[in-house]
Image (cartoon, coloured by chain):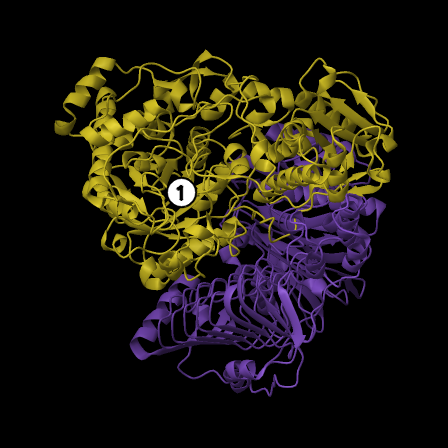
Chain colours: A yellow, B purple
Amino acid sequence: MLVASYIRPAIHRIPEFWSSERIEYVRHCAMHGVPPYALEDGPSRYGRILDRLVFRDVRKGDVEEGLRKADVLDIDLSVKFGEYYINVPIYIGDMSFGALSGNPNIAIARAVDIVGAVAGIGEGGLHPEVAKQRNIVIQWASARFGIDVDMLRSGIGVSIKIGQGAKPGIGGHLPGRKVVPLIAQLRKIPPGSEAISPAPHHDIYSIEDLAQRVKALRLITGRPVLVKVAAVNKISFIALGVARSTAAGIVIDGAGAGTGATPIAARDNLGIPIDYATPVVDQWLRSDGARDGFLIISGGMLYSASDIAKMLALGANMVNLGTAALLAMGCIMCHTCHVGNCPTALTNMIGFNKILDIEWGTHHLVNYIQALTRGLKAILYALGMTSIRELVGRRDLLEAHHIDGKVGEVLGVDVAEEGETAWIDSGVHAPYTSELIKGEPPIIGMGGVLPGLTRPARRMLDVLRIEAAQVTHPSVDPYREDVAVYARINGTYLDVPIVVPPIDRAAATAGFGLGALIDGDDCTFGEYCLNRYSPIRVSPGSTALTYGGVIVIDERMGGSMALEEAVSRLDMELRRVGTRDRVVIIAAGSFYTGADIYRLAALGADLVEPYGAFEDTYMKVKGLDHVQRRDKYEKLMLALVKELKLLMGAGGITDFYHMVGNRDLLRSLSGNVASMLGVKVAGE
Amino acid sequence: MCGILGVISLRGDGIPFSTVFRGLDIMRERGSGHGAGYAMVDPSPYVRVKAYFESEGDLEEARQALKPVKEEVYRLPGGIIDYVAYVEDGAPMPRRGVVYSLSRWLNVFKGATWHTEVAKLYGMWERRSSAWVAHIRYPTNSPGKKPYFSHPFSSGDVVIVHNGDLSSYGSNVNLLMYRYMQSSFTGNDSEAIAFLLNALSRDYDVEEAVVELIEGSRVRWARLDGPYAVAFIVGGEKPVLGAFVDKQHFRPLYMGMDGDNLYVASEAAAIRAMSPQAEVWVMRGGEYVIAGNGQVRGNFRKRPVSFVHPPIPGNAIDAAAYDTESLYHVVSRMVEEVGEANIYNVYGHRYIASGLKRGIVRAWGVVGNASANVMSGGQFYIYGDAQDDLGDAMNGGIIAVYGNVGDTVGQAKRGGELYVYGSAGTRAAIQHRDGVLVIGGSAGDYLGEYMGGGTVLVLRHTNDEEVGDHVAAGMVGGTIYIRGRVPMGKVGLIPRWDSVRRYLMSLMLDGIIDEATYSRALNSNDIGEVLRHVKWDNMYRLFNMPPHVEYRQLSQEELERLGPYIARFNDLFNTRVSIEDEEFTVVKPPPQHH
């Protein structure tokens, strides 16, 4: 069946970035070749930082006038790319043949040639039809699928993929069911096998290793080399290293970016947003004299003409659009890319009964890009500029609303109207315990979720982004290498840093089996019983004894402050008085995921009692017999620990016991939350 | 980040600076002009205080406080003043500025520039010392504009050079701040290592302190996580030089010895440049060496290999006359024009024969990183050692190395034949997909990690050391043959036996397995056997099914298939290796569990 029309977008219970309004914007562009509007009306209270920025002195009438006469305006949108010029500052980002089903790859490659944009082909071999197009960038990724010299030379550039915004520090993953014979042949792997790319390149463990790879590829191909990284805490150092490596530019992919498959734990917690990363990188490179002639290509939840203009003002030279291109070709944001039965024939398994009409896809994508360029010209016109080069790095043209001063300072943008950056709403909650009790960290397709910005965060903890490694040190793949999560309590080794709440006898045996600590008066597992250590139980914020022993900070007991704040303060206080290594801090609260455990540990908790997840599980299994219940509790803990290991591995952390209290691994999206918990702000 | 180097005379003789410089200069590619430095054993009757100031006022204040016996002042670009004061014991320290060295035994010289400039500024060419460390920097976590951030970093009588980026920095700083009352940090993780090593060596001897940094078994938050390769000197009446590398070998570290000196460096070529006759080998993850007072201690193994190389033909090109990029172009052009290129004096030149499609390249010396990458045909003979990443994404052709190779040899190799006379470093044949890799000696940790196809043969002929740990972790295809018996504890990821026993006990408590099954499972030889005894799905989530391992002689079919490669190996290296009548460990992917 040939797909050549739009269908109704998916509906989401909890708000996501890719709302039906935004999908409508893209479709309007793709159908008419002009955007419904070039600049939106006023700043938004929630959402990305971009949505809270406005151009200071732009008159709406001028923008509308610019849009009307966009085609006759003499405004230069071109970007120099190696020895080539690209007509528009748009890079369609790195979606592989395999992740996409072939026809969308062809449509993208044709569309960029028509409008003079550029497209990255992603990892996984070059589709013969894509190879006929000129403006493509060949990807060199960790698994080297299908790479040979001729292929490397077949585009206008080469891109080294270090990471992606949807899952920084975690390797590429094409599920086995999508590895059909044609894909297997192109990638040179057995059909049906999981095509897993190692999280790091095992020849790139450092900046100088990366520089070496950049030079090698430049020499072998004679093409400009780009480096694609996810936006992470140390992005400014990474970008400087890339700028010094003789690379032509850096592609920075922010948190919330799309993907064919990512663990939810990675999508929701790792890396930092592109609107934090871009201005920081631009400022850093300028201060070091490394900005001239170097391209910053920014991506991650971008889609509109206004987005492009603001990203350029924040410091980018070009933008990277991935999800938005798929939306133009019909994506309805149903988050099932990893399954292989895409209803719009974009990410479906090859050989599935639907295929995308290449002509239709190409036409709509061309329209979409042209609409963006018209919108961008209109904004430049209203700004009185004749070239996009005048706009790059002009943070002074922007003002921020509804963000705190600290975040404004990091971004280098004036805050016109201060507010709490983080969107916190304890009533909105999206636990996925029912997925965790299947025993594996759940996988999902597509991004668009940034707790605390584009979706309400349940509590302060959720506003903390977790460190992922890119370039400066390698991430570690917990499935193949050792990531130790053992903990110690008074000389006893626990295999996992989890305390099982006293909820069900079946949970206790499961916990004992896995080497967890068991809470409750009827525990019979000797040294694995919490009560054996005579714990002191306190509410968050109450004074805790500091000479030694086991302290359980339990948020069920009420208390004067949030549990996360109490843990962080106690950890620092104990260190100050010199008794930290004689005290075991247990954080007991309504926690649900491996990311919760990670963040509490980094704030100072030695062990975590996540009774939220156990209560959810109890509600689901209470009718089952003991062995069946044990099975589910066990699966819950296995999945929590795997999530924890994935997140640790992503940041190159191999030892839980020694990472406790390492606040340097966290960055806050909000300045206020940062100062309450003793961590830095994202990008700082 | 960067390139590090250390050398010590085992007899306490003076090693001239020129030796150190030769080694560091070879590693230019690891630097960026944003930092370099040297430290040496240089006893002085007075304590030497070395500090940077950013104003004349601060300098004057320090002068007043220190009342030096003698002093030196260097005015650096950017208005920074480098001040050296010789003071009596117990003199007060300057209140402002950054003290970067304070020792009567050690002397530190560094700058935010190239190694050549630092050498010139501080008159290094005149100096000799019994022990040196040196560093060339590619900055990671500071911009590299001020000399404070350059290596070496010192703390008391400890000075270190570091190549790495610690993920444990926040934890290490917590320990230093609260336990050891260290209060000021530049934010540089390497500096933290110097502080830690100095602090730990007050409570433990040097060797114990190093082990504590690697393992952290006694002092919580002392363990270094993430990549590191460190060389250090502890000054004193009897100075000590040491070096260690992280357990996963995320940073390169080579070691070498000749009759007089012990060397460590990020590149084999650097050691060869300092001592052409030295025996050189790659260290494995978690290895350390401590040398001084005529003794050499540590958990390292020597892995030297020697081979009498053929004479260099008259038409060969002297690689010393070219930098890496121009050598690449010269070689490519020659191969294109006359079908072959011979090069000698190769000292770490990178990318040689990368992208080669046809023709012959012969290289004498130490071939640098990322050579023979994406090679799809032709022949490449290396008379000497090859460093890291040889044969990455190789599709075809033949490579022969008449020496050792570094880490990650044959990564994602999809075809062709790669022969190594000596041993391989860590992660040999990672993601190997097709073709053949034959290693004449042994191989480090993670041999055949993620391997997807093809054949890897480890002959243990030129070095019969056991292969490293985690053989075939994540393997999905292909076969690894290792001569001799590799214990199951070295294959895949191994769980702690205590954990297995406790888990089985919990299954028995819940009646999921009976007592007989419990005992049978406990008597298993390896985790794969346990998994076969127990029918409980979650076990496969908890414990990885190890790769399939057989100990046996090769079958007739295997002898026939592998015979030609062994014949080629013997032919290339003039050996008489036979694979008949030998026991091999044959490793294949784990059986699929559904």
The picture places residue A646, in percent across and down from the top left corner, at 59, 43
Question: Residue B250 sits in which quadrant?
Answer: bottom right
Instruction: Count neighbours of disc 1 (C-alpha within 10 A) and say few if under 14, some if 14 to 19, many if 20 or more.
Output: many
Question: Residue A467 sits in which quadrant?
Answer: top right
The picture places residue A109, in percent across and down from the top left corner, at 26, 47
**Relative to residue A597, is residue A129 drawn left or right?**
left
Q: Which residue is mark 1?
A: A250
What kind of element bears circle 1?
A: strand
Residue B316 appearing in the image: yes
Chain under numbered label 1? A
**Relative to residue B231, is residue A292 drawn left or right?**
left
The picture places residue B114, in percent across and down from the top left corner, at 52, 51
**Relative to residue A256, is residue B262 drawn left or right?**
right
Residue B225's place in the image compared with B406, above or below, is above
The picture places residue B179, in percent across and down from the top left corner, at 79, 34
Q: Amino acid at mark 1?
A: Ile
Residue B44 appearing in the image: no
Q: Nearer the viewer, residue A491 or B427?
A: A491
